[in-house]
Image (cartoon, rainbow, N blue to C red):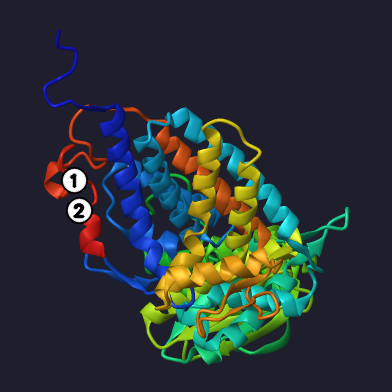
């Protein structure tokens, strides 16, 4: 009996498991070389020829032309880690790949997938509990510690050369948007941290503004552009001649009628400008258009006007200046105005707007080229996320593989209390977690086995903080050495990795209506059918 179309494909049981595990591991292994301070970068070239150079795990996976349904599930691990923790994407993907590699060995021993999944779930729960036990509670206002967290996040990225300065900017930015909740906890409003980039200058010239950067020009060259303390009007109403709702035509018999018509338009614009002057505003940021005549009249009054300001910038300015956005100019009063200083960078074509009690900051990143500032921005964004997480959570862990080795040791002890075949899965989970120190050592040109032996010996001796110094190859107290990671990020990485691995292991049957490709186009290097394990053809080109 034929129940499937001629183009349909189906893979079952062990073949399906091998297919899925191989695809997932291929994705994980593609980003492992980027892990750690000595990690390498990837150059990604898209179909339009645009080049991205980065070692940020989630960026690599998002930019790669992955055309395989199972591989895309691993990409989701990185995206979830990025959304929830902001950093640790490569760690999460590497652990997921290693879990599947170890699960494949258990499957070869005829251990059923459900037993492996149950064991992995037990191990993941225990691992998260142990992370909480290992983590050290810290004062979320400890600037020195937060700076170390930021520096750890940026190490190995292009921002590392100026990480002292950039880490300080990140910490100051987070402090500028942190508020204390009623229960005493700290809440970080990262939506009020903006990042602006400039090329042609050194990263060491980056700075933090207690306000906003507006990439606009004044509407008239004769307008003043510098104010120490300006009254600012935020306007969401065009300063233009009002148009009728319906199409109209005007019949003119003599030139006097035309002049009257033009005079009425001019009078209408003068009245709008007079309304702005009456509010006492020194500066107007308008989300809509400003007529040429109105521009001239505003310049005569000594008022700085900027038109077509982005909606997002208007909302940001509202927070910085304490102003209200006015949607009807007729209703504008001095009560709607905000106060702040305005300065102009003519070379860059930027306005700097700063407020005294601004709940909003802007990091102005500078770099020599577009590729440099793009990678700087990714590094700074990760650092902002981990610092804000630490400030909100108040728990940190020693880095350099210290946590992973300690977790593996405790999970092996925990496995002794687990009965049945799940015990083997827990032990496999413990082995998988140690992929982090092994990859760190390998990427630094060190012997992975010797490094792991030394780390295990240190932890067996009771040194919970013992991690790898990838620059010297020594085992050191990484917390004292300033290699600090947020506990929440590690917990999320363990959860994401185990859930993704279990999702892949749960599949025992793949039924495809056609080619196993997520693009649906055989001509674009898709999966190439079941036999090819494909769907990763685009990846090969990207790497």
Label 2 sits on a secondary structure element that is helix
Q: Which mark is residue 132?
A: none
Residue 486 image-quadrant placement: bottom right
Residue at position x 42%, y 46% from top?
102
Labels 2 and 1 touching (C-beta < 8 A): yes
Disc 1: CA contacts within 10 A as few (<14), some (14-19) or many (>=20)? many
Q: Does 145 sit left or right of 518 as displayed?
A: right
Q: Nearer the viewer, residue 273 or 280?
A: 280
The residue positioned farthest toward the top in the image shown: 1
Residue at position x 55%, y 67% from top?
382
Pointer 2 or 1: first along the chain: 1
Q: CA distance from mark 2 to mark 1?
A: 7 Å
Q: Nearer the viewer, residue 38 or 60?
A: 38
Q: Does 30 sit left or right of 336 as displayed?
A: left
Residue 97 appears at what percent x and percent y? 41, 51
Tally of numbered tags: 2
Q: Nearer the viewer, residue 533 or 48?
A: 533
Residue denoted by label 2: 537
Residue at position x 30%, y 58% from top?
64
Residue 498 appears at what percent x and percent y? 51, 44
Residue denoted by label 1: 526
Residue 195 appears at what percent x and percent y? 55, 73
Q: Nearer the viewer, residue 325 or 522?
A: 522
Residue at position x 66%, y 79% from top?
482
Q: Is residue 78 above or below residue 339?
A: above
Label 1 sits on a secondary structure element that is loop
Q: Is residue 422 above or below residue 399?
A: above
């Amino acid at each position: 009996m034929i129940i499937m179309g001629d183009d349909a494909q189906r893979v079952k049981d062990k073949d399906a498991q091998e297919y899925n595990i191989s695809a997932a591991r291929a994705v994980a292994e593609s980003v492992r070389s980027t892990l750690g301070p000595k990690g390498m970068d990837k150059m990604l070239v898209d179909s339009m020829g645009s080049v991205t150079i980065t070692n940020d795990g989630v960026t690599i996976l998002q930019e790669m032309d992955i055309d395989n349904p199972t591989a895309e599930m691993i990409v989701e691990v990185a995206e979830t880690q990025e959304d929830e923790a902001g950093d640790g994407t490569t760690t999460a993907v590497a652990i997921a790949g290693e879990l599947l590699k170890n699960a494949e060995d258990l499957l070869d021993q005829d251990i059923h997938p459900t037993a492996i999944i149950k064991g992995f779930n037990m191990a993941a729960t225990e691992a998260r509990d142990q992370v909480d036990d290992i983590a050290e509670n810290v004062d979320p206002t400890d600037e020195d510690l937060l700076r170390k967290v930021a520096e750890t996040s940026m190490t190995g990225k292009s921002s590392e050369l100026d990480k002292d300065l950039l880490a300080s900017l990140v910490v100051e930015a987070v402090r500028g948007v942190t508020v204390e909740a009623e229960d005493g906890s700290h809440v970080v409003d990262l939506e009020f941290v903006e990042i602006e980039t400039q090329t042609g200058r050194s990263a060491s010239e980056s700075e933090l503004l207690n306000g906003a950067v507006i990439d606009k020009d004044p509407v008239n060259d004769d307008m003043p552009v510098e104010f120490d303390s300006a009254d600012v009007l935020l306007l969401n109403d065009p300063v233009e001649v009002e148009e009728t709702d319906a199409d109209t035509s005007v019949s003119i018999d003599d030139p006097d009628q035309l002049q009257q018509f033009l005079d009425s338009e001019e009078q209408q614009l003068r009245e709008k400008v007079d309304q702005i002057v009456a509010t006492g505003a020194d500066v107007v940021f308008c989300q809509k258009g400003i007529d040429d005549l109105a521009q001239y009249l505003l310049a005569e009054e000594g008022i700085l006007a900027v038109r077509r300001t982005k909606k997002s910038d208007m909302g940001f300015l509202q927070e910085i200046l304490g102003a209200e956005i006015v949607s009807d100019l007729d209703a504008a009063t001095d009560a709607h105005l905000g106060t702040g200083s305005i300065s102009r960078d003519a070379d860059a074509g930027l306005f700097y707007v700063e407020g005294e009690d601004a709940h909003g900051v802007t990091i102005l990143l500078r770099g020599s080229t577009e590729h440099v500032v793009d990678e700087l921005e990714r590094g700074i964004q990760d650092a902002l996320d981990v610092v804000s997480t630490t400030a909100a959570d108040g728990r940190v862990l020693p880095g350099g593989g210290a946590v992973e080795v300690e977790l593996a040791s405790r999970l092996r002890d925990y496995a002794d209390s687990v009965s049945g075949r799940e015990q083997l899965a827990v032990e496999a989970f413990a082995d998988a977690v140690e992929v982090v120190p092994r990859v760190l050592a390998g990427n630094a040109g060190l012997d992975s086995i010797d490094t792991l032996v030394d780390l295990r010996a240190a932890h067996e001796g009771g040194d919970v903080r013992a991690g790898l110094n990838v620059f010297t190859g020594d085992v050191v107290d990484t917390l004292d050495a300033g290699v600090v990671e947020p506990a929440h990020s590690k917990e999320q990485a363990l959860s994401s990795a185990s859930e993704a691995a279990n999702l892949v292991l749960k599949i025992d049957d793949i039924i495809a209506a056609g080619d196993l490709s997520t693009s649906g186009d055989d001509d674009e290097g898709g999966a190439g059918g079941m036999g090819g394990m494909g769907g990763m053809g685009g990846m090969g080109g990207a790497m």
